[in-house]
Image (spheres, helix red, strand yellow):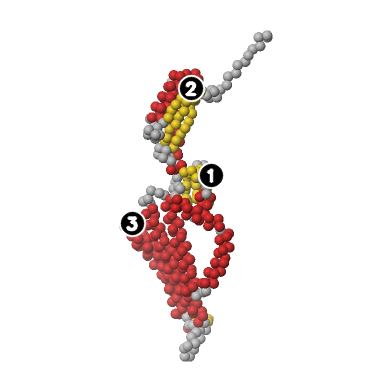
Amino acid sequence: MLASTVTKIINYEIIKGNAIWRFALVLLIILAAMAIGRIVRYAIDLYAQQRKGKKGVSFLTLFLECITKPTSVAIFALGFYLCKLCLVFEDITATPAISGISSTAEAGWTKIAQAVIAIAVAYGLYRMVDIVEYYLQQWTSKTKTKLDDMLVPVVRKSLRITIAIVSAIYIVDNILEQNIQSILLGAGVGGVAIALAAKDTIANFFGSITIFADRPFQVDELVKIGEHLGVVEEVGFRSTRIRTLQGSLVTVPNSTLVNSAMENFGRRPFIRRTSSITITYDSGSNGAKKAVEIIKDVLAQVPEINIDSEKQPRVYFDNFNDWSLNIYMSYWVKPVDFWLYKEVNERVNLKIMERFEQEKIEFAFPTQTLYVKKDLTE
């Protein structure tokens, strides 16, 4: 009695010609496909990591890492397709005609399976862009300029967008058999409105192309664009990011950047300092001469200060101020490093102060002397 009841339940038709056991088998195949996909994915990933640990990064390890997830998706698509074999679909050509699930549903089932397989292939190509990115980074790391390093993520994004668009068109046109021409025509009409709304984005895109072509600066160089002074951190398709000396991150649209005057401090062969050192009139001519000699001696002992004939330090007693004797000082610091330049200035300042204190030479500061005339009649 129990066996008969179980048999009736198992053979109970949920949809024409399809007993409940057929749908249970479909569920079992889907679960098995998901499990097999996970196992294969884990096995491939484990082998890739072991090979990388023994032989380092290679094309094979990169390839295996890229196909781990797409392989599991492809296995699921294959299992989904096999599920169709477990079901009964109507066949009006058979004798007698077979009654089952609509043949339209069967065709749709096949298209969905094919679409998932195509997505798996597209996903694999999408992931393989990482291989191109890896070898591009290896190539750009050997060049002196750092600006081409920024081309790597741009190429990566461009390839991935292209793969996504081509794959979507292929799936819609060849697998789902939709009228892609009407879709593209509608997108073209809408694209005009989008282009008008996104004219600033397009201008920024062409601005980025100009930057990559002209290379007015490199990453990590100190530049001044408008009122913004800082180090270039990143150049993208839309904007350039600058880290100011105060620590703020400024984003400048590329269209604005290419149309603005830019001062590149990183391209200077030297960093020049010009300063005036003032001493008191009480120092006299001997004090002025001694001060000039001290400053020249201090500058000669700093290795970062350039001593070439054209860019050698300049020190002169050049003017009589209202309240001081003025000594002109100028020198060039190399290599071009803003913070090194600040450090050199500090060393020079401290050394000059020490030597002046030893020689009893006093720095001048703005002073004013008042003479009061007494009234003799008092």
Image position, residue 136 (x, y; %): 39, 56
The mark closer to the camera, 2 or 3, is 2
Q: In the rendered image of this protein, does residue 243 appear above or below residue 204?
A: above
- The amino acid type found where label 3 is placed reads Gly
Q: Are marks 2 and 3 in contact (CB under 8 Å)?
A: no
| Real-space Cα separation, disc 2 to disc 3, in angstroms | 66 Å
Residue position for label 3: 56
Hey, which residue is sitting farthest bottom in the picture?
A: 96
Residue position for label 2: 362
User: Badge 1 local density, few (<14 within 10 Å), some, or many (20+)?
Assistant: few
Secondary structure under badge 2?
Answer: loop
Tell me if residue 8 can be seen. no
The mark closer to the camera, 1 or 3, is 1
On the picture, is 306 further left or further right than 97? left
Secondary structure under badge 3?
Answer: loop
Image position, residue 262 (x, y; %): 50, 45
